[in-house]
Image (cartoon, rainbow, N blue to C red):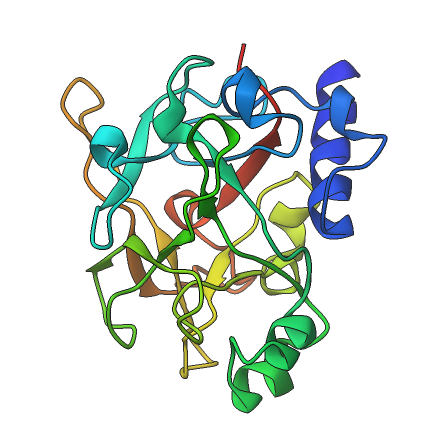
Amino acid sequence: MGGKRTIRAAVAVLIAGGVSAAAPVVASAGTPACGPGCIGVFSNELGSYAQPNFVEHVWGGTASIGTPTGLTQASGSDSSEDFINPHPGFVSDYYNLGLVSAEVNRQYGSLRASQLEYAPLGVPTGLCVGAADDPYQNEALSLRSCTIPGRTVWIIATSLSPASAAKGFFPIVSGATSDFSHPFTMSYPRHVDTSETLPPIRLRHLKFVGADKTVPAQQLWGVRFGELQ
């Protein structure tokens, strides 16, 4: 029952748009200095809420535009895994900030959204996980200025995969997408060799499998908050 409570708490905190009283129930996601609002994104392909195994990080911990982001072994002492959300809210809030298009707002305005600002040891850098160009298939994610419209906003697309969302996993759609039938979403390679340096997270068209439109695990993500143990 404890594991189920943890998953429910994680989803509740994320959908609420920030850290709430539920946050301490959720296992962790960054260094102690990053604090309880630190966000750790992990792939359903490689981990679970009980054991995320690998979380998103900035390669080399380098806070520079263009530095790729991928997954690395979860660690409470690795500041390259420290991210915060500077603007918790809905897609419509990001539209009001001028960070997503009117088309994206029409499609997803009622959904929660987030930026992932790199904040090693809790210090904001003004750089967020994003796309260098208009989304295209297999585009690698990297650090970009958090102020670039569309490129650094991520939509928590629970409505696109309700069955997996009930288990705490969901697609994360790029706020720069213009294909709303198969939007560009964070994706990770299947069957990667985790003994080697893991590749960047990439954008790929959201894929539905079978009559029930199941989303594959490599396009589903979970989130943990606070310090990694």
Instruction: Report the residue that reaches farthest toward the right.
Output: 21
The residue located at (65%, 39%) in the rendering is: 168
Q: Residue furthest top?
A: 229
Query: Residue 47 falls in which quadrant of the image?
Result: top left
The percent coordinates of residue 104 (x first, y second) are 54, 82
Q: Position of residue 60 (x, y in %)?
A: 21, 30
Quarter of the figure with the C terminus: top right
Q: Is residue 127 left or right of residue 167?
A: left
- Residue at image location 63% in from the left, 57% down from the top: 87
Quadrant in the picture for residue 160: bottom right
The image quadrant where one finds the N terminus is top right
x then y, percent, for residue 159: 66, 63
On the image, the x and y values in percent for residue 209 come to 43, 59
Q: Tell me the residue at 64%/34% (across/down).
A: 37
| Viewer-side residue, 208 vs 223 | 223
Position of residue 207 in the picture relative to residue 14 (left or right): left
Q: Is residue 164 above or below residue 51?
A: below
| 190 and 75: which is toward the camera | 75
Res 55 seen here: no
Q: Is residue 161 left or right of residue 25?
A: left
